[in-house]
Image: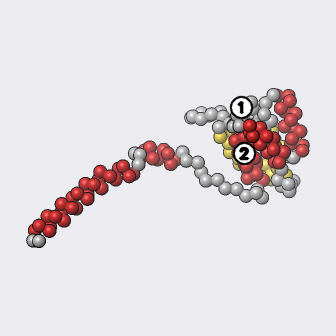
Amino acid sequence: MHARTRTALFASAAIAATLSLTAVTPALAGPSTSAHTAAVSSAPAPSQGDPRSTTNRVADFYGAYIDSVWDNEDPAASANAKALRSFYLSAAAKKKVAAFEAKEHADGILFAQNVPVKWKVTYTGSGAGHATSLVTLTWSDGKNPEVTKIKVQSDLRTRKITDLAAVK
């Protein structure tokens, strides 16, 4: 084979490979950059926890409790919500929740009759054997979602929730 023929053959192969990559690369990349960015930015953050942390336990409780009441058509949901209250709340907190529910005909954990779409728990301080967390409940999506807050007090020794109060 002559050098000129080999050069032409290699050049043709290189052009064909380049054109193939140009055609295939956008398909391999997936959706457009703006759509990909939106999907990535809305992905939930990784979760982690520590069973020794009262704030993590409050977050665990609210996450599991909201999941249970959200799935109210699942036969196990009501039993699960009751079991969560029994495990995470002190006797005094259970009494306070029951009194609120009897008076207000609303959920004494969420201080509402419906279920939030999002929740967040933030440590706000500790002292006298208790830690305080602020639970932020988000009730809708969009630019101006409705938000309520609940002050939750936990015993540092037992890590049980000892008091809940709606923040006005």
- Disc 2 crowd rating (10 Å Cα; few below 14, some 14-19, many 20+) is some
Q: Quadrant of the N terminus?
A: bottom left
Residue 106: image quadrant is top right
Where residue 119 sits in the image (x, y, percent)? 68, 42
Q: Under tag 1, what secondary structure?
A: loop
Q: Residue at x 73, y 49 (%)?
A: 60
Query: Which amino acid type corresponds to the residue marked 2 in the rendered image?
Result: Ala
Mark 1 or mark 2, whichever is nearer to me: 2
| Residue 125 spot, x, y in % from top left | 77, 51
Q: Exactly how many numbered labels are in the figure?
A: 2
Residue found 86% across the figure and 42% down from its top: 93
Mark 2 or mark 1, which is nearer the start of the sequence? Answer: 2
Rendered view: 78 above or below 53: above
Which corner quadrant of the image does residue 150 belong to? top right
The residue identified by callout 2 is: 64
Q: Is residue 108 left or right of residue 40?
A: right
The residue drawn where x is 64% and y is 53% is 47
Labels 1 & 2 near each other (Cβ < 8 A): no
In the image shown, does 8 or 97 lie closer to the viewer? 8
In the picture, residue 85 is in which quadrant? top right
Give the distance between the C-alpha atoms of the residues marked 1 and 2, in whole angstroms. 16 Å
- Residue, disc 1: 114
- Is the residue 69 above or below the residue 122 in the image? above
